[in-house]
């Protein structure tokens, strides 16, 4: 019988190219986890409009080639680092550990950590970052994910993601605050521009399709109140190659897919305007690069390039209608910050991601009805936070991943 391709034998492998028009070399590629990847080649087409005595059509042609589709997955730590870098047009970076010395006191109420030497800002710490303290006598303050929700040079307010309370402690202990993993944000300059070769390898057919000169044009994240977080990466490309040498696949011996834990919204915290909000029933957001192609040039059936546009960041929250606070952010056109941190579990050092929007405007507060708790749907647009407020990053959106390397 004829073999038929099946999804469980399909493999998604990708690698950044060195330049536009230069297919990635076969070594050192990465296998990517997926729910689906539906990239495929398309061609423009056109038919003859001649009026013939036969009253029929005599010609039909293929035109400009293009690649489009979406890589869809469940959002997990350490998995999509390179794809997110392409979306945000920057590389992940780390913040050096802050050796605060003996000048920090701890308090059960905010500000939770006070630095008499006022070094938090100069150390590179910002609202939305997650780090771990070491060196306190009180063990409950040490080696535990702490989300910063408000920050000045000398005052740090926040929450331990596992729900542990901060234990009060006087200064005198030599303490250090270390952010976990790396963070990435949309920069104000020196933007990167990446091109990818992405392969679908069908091992049950010994066939391979390589999509070349691809741009990762955005990402859409969905954080439902129950269920796994998901992410979609739309892709645009210029062409497809089916030549893979003597046999498939083209990318030989790629790096195995990551094993990072999948995120779920039930493990984490959401802060709006610096205040914890426990009534959010859903959070979705999209980062759109607004890429375009010219749609053909004379003498070639492949477009010359994919052109990036300005980055738009939009989203939506669904919120239980419990007070006027959230509604009035919309009514009064109040700019607020939005900080969301989600982890893979409830342990003190569980892997996590944060998604931070330093400057947000709410675009609506539509309430539903029925014999149930009423909810408001609140679409929002994130804006460039430049100049940055104290303790924030000058960007529209940034993210931290504990497993980023």
Image (cartoon, helix red, strand yellow):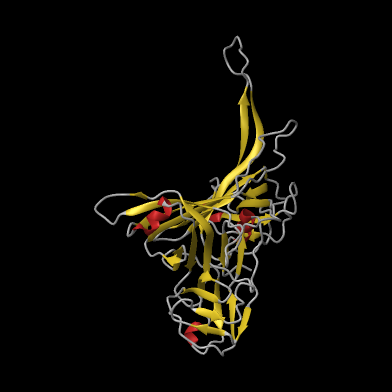
Question: In the image as oriented, which residue stretches furthest toward the top?
Answer: 53
Report the side of 364 relative to 393 (left or right).
left
Q: Which quarter of the picture shows residue 226? A: bottom left
* Point 53% across, 61% down: residue: 356
Q: Is residue 318 visible?
A: no
Q: Is residue 298 visible?
A: yes
Task: From the top left corner, tell me how far across and down residue 42 is, in percent.
Answer: 61, 38
* Point 48% across, 57% down: residue: 230
Task: From the top left corner, tell me how far across and down residue 367 is, in percent.
Answer: 33, 50
Task: From the top left corner, tell me how far across and down residue 219 is, in percent.
Answer: 55, 53
Q: Is residue 284 above or below residue 119?
A: above
Q: Nearer the viewer, residue 328 or 164?
A: 328
Question: In the image as oriented, which residue stretches furthest toward the left?
Answer: 371
Q: Nearer the viewer, residue 281 or 43?
A: 281
Q: Is residue 237 above or below residue 28?
A: above
* Point 45% across, 49% down: residue: 363
Q: Nearer the viewer, residue 9 or 177?
A: 177
């Amino acid at each position: 019988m004829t073999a038929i391709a099946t999804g469980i034998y399909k493999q998604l492998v990708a690698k950044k190219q060195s330049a536009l028009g230069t297919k990635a070399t076969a070594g050192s590629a990465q296998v990517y986890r997926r729910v689906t990847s539906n990239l495929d080649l398309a061609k423009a087409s056109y038919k003859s409009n001649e009026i013939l005595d036969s009253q029929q059509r005599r010609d039909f042609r293929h035109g400009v080639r293009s690649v489009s589709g979406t890589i869809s997955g469940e959002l997990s730590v350490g998995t999509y680092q390179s794809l997110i870098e392409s979306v945000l047009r920057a590389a992940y970076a780390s913040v050096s550990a802050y050796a605060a010395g003996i000048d920090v006191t701890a308090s059960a109420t905010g500000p939770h950590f006070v630095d008499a030497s006022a070094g938090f800002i100069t150390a590179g710490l910002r609202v939305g970052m997650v780090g771990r303290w070491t060196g306190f006598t009180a063990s409950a303050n040490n080696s535990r994910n702490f989300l910063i929700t408000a920050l000045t040079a000398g005052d740090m307010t926040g929450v331990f993601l596992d729900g542990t309370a901060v234990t009060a402690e006087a200064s005198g202990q030599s303490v250090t605050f270390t952010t976990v993993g790396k963070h990435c944000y949309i920069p104000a300059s020196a933007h990167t521009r990446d091109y990818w070769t992405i392969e679908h390898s069908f091992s049950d057919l010994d066939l391979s399709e390589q999509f070349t000169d691809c741009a990762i044009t955005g990402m859409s994240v969905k954080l439902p109140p129950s269920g796994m977080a998901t992410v979609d990466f739309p892709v645009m490309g210029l062409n497809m190659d089916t030549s893979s040498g003597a046999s498939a696949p083209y990318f030989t011996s790629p790096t195995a897919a990551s094993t990072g834990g999948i995120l779920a919204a039930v493990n984490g915290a959401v802060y709006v305007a610096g205040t914890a909000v426990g009534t959010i029933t859903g959070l979705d957001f999209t980062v759109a690069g607004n890429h375009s192609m010219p749609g053909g040039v004379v003498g070639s059936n492949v477009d010359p390039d994919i052109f990036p546009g300005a980055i738009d960041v939009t989203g939506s929250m669904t919120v239980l209608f419990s007070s006027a606070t959230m509604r009035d952010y919309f009514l009064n056109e109040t700019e607020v910050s939005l900080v969301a941190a989600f982890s893979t579990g409830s342990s003190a050092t569980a892997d996590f991601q944060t998604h931070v929007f330093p400057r947000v405007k709410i675009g609506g507060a539509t309430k539903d009805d029925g014999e149930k708790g009423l909810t408001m749907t609140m679409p929002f647009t994130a804006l460039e936070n430049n100049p940055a407020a104290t303790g924030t990053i000058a960007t529209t959106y940034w993210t931290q991943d504990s497993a980023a390397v």
